[in-house]
Amino acid sequence: MLRTGIRAWSRRVGKVWRYLSTGNFSGLTGEISQFWEWLCGGKAASRPLSGGSNVKISKGETGDAFRSSNCVPIEVVEMAVYPTEFLVPQLRKHIPLKEFPFVAANKENLDWSEKDLRAKICELGPWTYDLSFSYGLTTRLNSIYSDGTVDFHRFRTKLVSETIIDLLGDEVGQSTVLDLACHCGVFTLDVAHRGAGLVQGIEFRQKNLDQAKFLKKYYRIRNARFRKGDIYRLRSDKKYDVVMCLGILYHVIDPIRLLEFCYDSCKKFTIIDTICHKQPISAYCVAIGKRPEGAPESELEGTRSIELQPTYRAVIETMREVGFREIIEVVGTCDTPIELYSEFSRRCFIGFK
Ligand SMILES: C[S@@+](CC[C@H](N)C(=O)[O-])C[C@H]1O[C@@H](n2cnc3c(N)ncnc32)[C@H](O)[C@@H]1O
């Protein structure tokens, strides 16, 4: 009985310490929560954002409950709300939600019989992106996405790719682009299709790489390349005009090293798309326990079970520190609010050399 009591108490103390050390107090109640809010200068969860609505972070990219700086059990979490900060100049873009141009232009490929194509789509799945092919076939044959993620992907792909192409201007056709942790290569293919000279995607997981190589072949995008690579082992001896660091900064244990790599590897600019925590401090939050023991590995996650996720200020300050001369934010607006982006929990930055 005594032992059980001690165990229960030490669990409670450990939990409080973890909340305190990560700055995420959303799962705490009562005095501790209020004390921590007071200490951080934060306000209670009902405080409206500058945009008028309350921030409610509930879903991650995979559609799971969003488990930011994950010391809180996996249920939907109402985060304490901080006003959204805007500390760098912005480039604003309106984003109509449309099918990826490389798909719209190339979806008919009659080199494939319907039977073979169907079998290939099923074999390579489950798919995360909504993609169409000949005979009215789509990745829905074997997929793990919902309607919400279709819009999410269309929004962010256009936001990133169009910005890169616009910034490269007349030099686009001679430009080289590196896409780090490219998953099934949608950004790589999109930027290549929009006219970049050569786009190199790098991905660690074989399953994602197999999908990417199939899509490149199917949609006949010759200026895209894919290879296996671990971002923890990359060397910056080869330089690219542009580096894409999308959806990966918050999945690693050494985000500062990753941003140094981006700086060293780009000749013109790096584009970074990342989750940003809102606490008005420059910090990285520890996210742990994202994969319960025995659960299958998610193809979208990092390769470590622990990761460091940046606050908004940490992204900007680290970018400055590694050398980027000028930093801007690309803000996309859309007729349909896009999860995470419309709440500024996920943001897109460009660092110029
Ligand atoms: C959230 S997804 C982002 C994919 C894509 N860049 C995007 O923005 O949609 C994270 C990707 O990083 C890949 N990844 C995770 N750890 C990696 C590592 N150490 N090296 C290379 N890729 C990695 C995953 O396999 C996954 O494809």
Image (cartoon, rainbow, N blue to C red):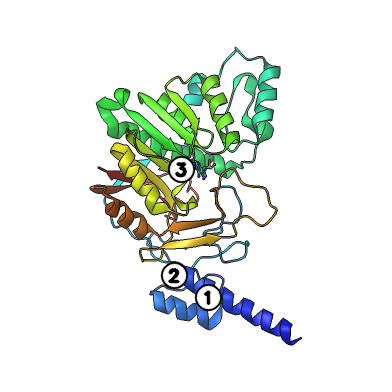
Q: Is residue 10 above or below residue 306?
A: below
> Is the N terminus in the top left, top right, bottom left or bottom right quadrant?
bottom right
Q: Is mark 3 within 8 Å of ligand 1?
A: yes
Q: Which residue was labeled with disc 3?
A: 231
Q: Nearer the viewer, residue 244 or 158?
A: 244
Query: Crowding at label 3, few (<14), some or many (≥20) Cα neighbours within 10 Å?
Result: some
Q: Which residue was labeled with disc 2?
A: 47
Real-space Cα distance between discs 2 and 1?
26 Å
Q: Residue furthest top?
A: 111
Query: Residue sitting at 55 percent across and 48 percent down?
Result: 303
Residue 91 seen anywhere in this rendered image of the structure? yes
Which image quadrant for residue 199? top left
Kindly report which numbered mark, 1 or 3, lies closer to the viewer in this rendering: 3
Query: Crowding at label 2, few (<14), some or many (≥20) Cα neighbours within 10 Å?
Result: some
Q: Amino acid at mark 3?
A: Ile
Real-space Cα distance between discs 3 and 2?
39 Å
Regarding mark 2 in the picture, which secondary structure is present there?
Answer: loop
Residue 45 seen anywhere in this rendered image of the structure? no
Q: Amino acid at mark 2?
A: Arg
Q: Residue furthest bottom?
A: 2
Real-space Cα distance between discs 1 and 3?
31 Å
The circle on residue 17 is 1
Picture coordinates of residue 168 (x, y %)?
A: 28, 31
Picture coordinates of residue 318 (x, y %)?
A: 33, 55
Picture coordinates of residue 247 (x, y %)?
A: 47, 46
